Amino acid sequence: MFKKFSFSTDIAGQSQLKSSVQRAIRTKLQEQYPMLEAVLEELIPKKTPIVLIKGHEHISFLSVNGEILFFQHFDGPYFPTLILLHKYPDILPKLQVDRGAIKFVLSGANIMCPGLTSKGARMDIDLPEGAVVSIMAEGKENALAVGLLKMSTEDIRKVNKGIGCDNIHYLTDTLWKELVPL
């Protein structure tokens, strides 16, 4: 999604959201990420305005105090940025890929079922198709990608071939490079 992205060229505009829209977004985030509830007030204080940044290609970003926290494609789910995920690693369920998959994930490849079921990989919890997940790597501490499951973890174990998870946002993509200060 972010192979070629730049805030200087790919942003159409931005606007501060009305308080009713902010409440609706907070509610949607709480529904989508129940584990976020403990830190939601710290992330998005009630009196702090949320700025919606609209990009080309139907991508929008939620910014609070100048920091981009979430992004959304069309009306799909909100995805946390990797920077937010590194600060609060427990807001998403985790899947772990084996060492062999790391270089492919960091190149933007989707995560294949065998990369999630092999010896070094882990899928500890059952998740439905369409769940937003944190992609961890064998032997690494921080998430290397944010993914969207193409099939349930149960089906990934059964089928064990094809794409199991779409790679939505990964370390070294252009969004990561735009958000991380040098």
Image (spheres, rainbow, N blue to C red):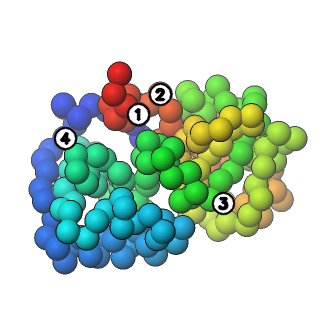
- Name the element at disc 3: loop
Q: What residue type is labelled 1?
A: Trp
Between marks 1 and 3, how big is the CA–CA gap?
Answer: 26 Å
Res 11 label: 4
Residue 4 appears in the picture as rendered:
no
- x, y (%) of residue 36? 48, 65
Question: Type of residue at label 4?
Answer: Ile
- What residue is at 44 percent from the left and 31 percent from the top? 173
Q: Which amino acid does label 2 sit on?
A: Thr
- Judged by depth in the image, the label closer to the viewer, 1 or 3, is 1
Between discs 4 and 3, the one toward the N terminus: 4
Q: Tell me, yes or no, whether the two marked residues, 2 and 1, touch with CB atoms within 8 Å.
A: yes
- Of badges 4 and 2, nearer the viewer stands 2
The location of residue 182, given as percent across then percent down, is 35, 22
Could you give the CA–CA distance between mark 4 and mark 2, rounded to whole angstroms? 20 Å
Label number found at residue 151: 3
